[in-house]
């Protein structure tokens, strides 16, 4: 079970990259999203991916945290996958919006502006739990998704 947990939370090793493992996890998420969108482009598929990522996060992140006794290990990138997929909702196959979703999500995840830093700090600065590990990325994804949605409205109104 330890090996399965490590494989899933590191997204098949992307989280083990020595530099920018979160960015590598997000990039992997974008590639999977693009492939799935190309093969099965339905809104239901997008929600199924996100739902599956939620389930994987809540099963395997706590197991990995318990096993490693780490608070928020950088090799855990399945939470970045979830957040990135949330950011990608509504981008369709528009490469500009896909790139924007990637950049915005990474910026929100790295810099953690309000309210993301509040979620990241759940339980205090000396305590990390599954909720804070996962939901700061969910919040970053939601913030990126909202900005992309607003951008698309602005672009459409100017056309």
Image (tube, grey):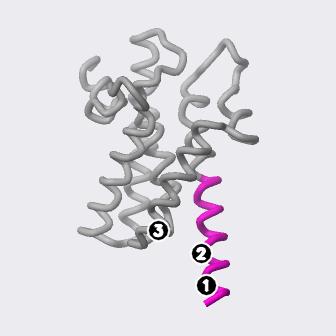
Q: Where is residue 108 in the image (x, y as percent from the top left)?
A: 62, 44
| Residue 141 placement (x, y as % from top left) | 56, 50
Q: In which quarter of the image is residue 129?
A: top right
Is 72 displayed left or right of 95 in the figure?
right
* Residue at (54, 35) in percent of width and height: 134
Give the overall secondary structure of the magenta segment: helix
Q: In front: mark 1 or mark 3?
A: 3
Number of other residues with Cα within 10 Å of mark 2, as a class: few under 14, some 14 to 19, many 20 or more: some
Q: Are marks 1 and 3 in contact (CB under 8 Å)?
A: no
User: Residue beneath label 1, please?
Assistant: 156
Above or below: residue 57 compared with residue 140:
above
Distance from the alpha carbon under mark 1 to that under mark 2: 6 Å
Q: What stretch is highlighted in magenta?
A: 142-159
Label 1 packing within 10 angstroms: few (<14), some (14-19), many (20+): few
Asked whether, in this view, residue 154 is left or right of residue 64, the answer is right
Q: Which of marks 3 and 2 is nearer the N terminus?
A: 3
Are circles 1 and 2 on residues that touch, CB within 8 Å?
yes
Distance between mark 3 and mark 2 Cα atoms: 11 Å
What residue would you read off at disc 3?
Answer: 96
Residue 157 percent location from the top left of the image: 67, 86
Q: Residue furthest top?
A: 69
| Mark 2 lies on residue | 152
Please tell me whether mark 1 sits on a helix, a strand or a loop: helix
Q: Quadrant of the image for the C terminus?
A: bottom right
């Amino acid at each position: 079970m330890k090996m399965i947990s490590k494989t899933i939370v590191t997204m098949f090793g992307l989280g083990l990259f020595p530099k920018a493992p979160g960015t590598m996890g997000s990039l992997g998420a974008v590639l999977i999203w693009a492939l799935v969108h190309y093969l099965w482009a339905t809104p239901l598929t997008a929600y199924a991916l996100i739902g599956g990522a939620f389930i994987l996060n809540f099963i395997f992140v706590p197991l990995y945290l318990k096993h490693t006794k780490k608070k928020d290990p950088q090799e855990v990138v399945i939470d970045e996958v979830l957040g990135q997929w949330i950011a990608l909702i509504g981008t369709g196959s528009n490469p500009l919006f896909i790139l924007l979703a990637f950049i915005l999500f990474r910026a929100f995840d790295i810099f953690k502006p309000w309210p993301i830093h509040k979620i990241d700090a759940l339980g205090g600065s000396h305590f990390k739990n599954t909720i804070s590990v996962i939901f700061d990325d969910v919040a970053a994804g939601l913030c990126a998704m909202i900005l992309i949605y607003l951008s698309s409205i602005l672009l459409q109104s100017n056309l």
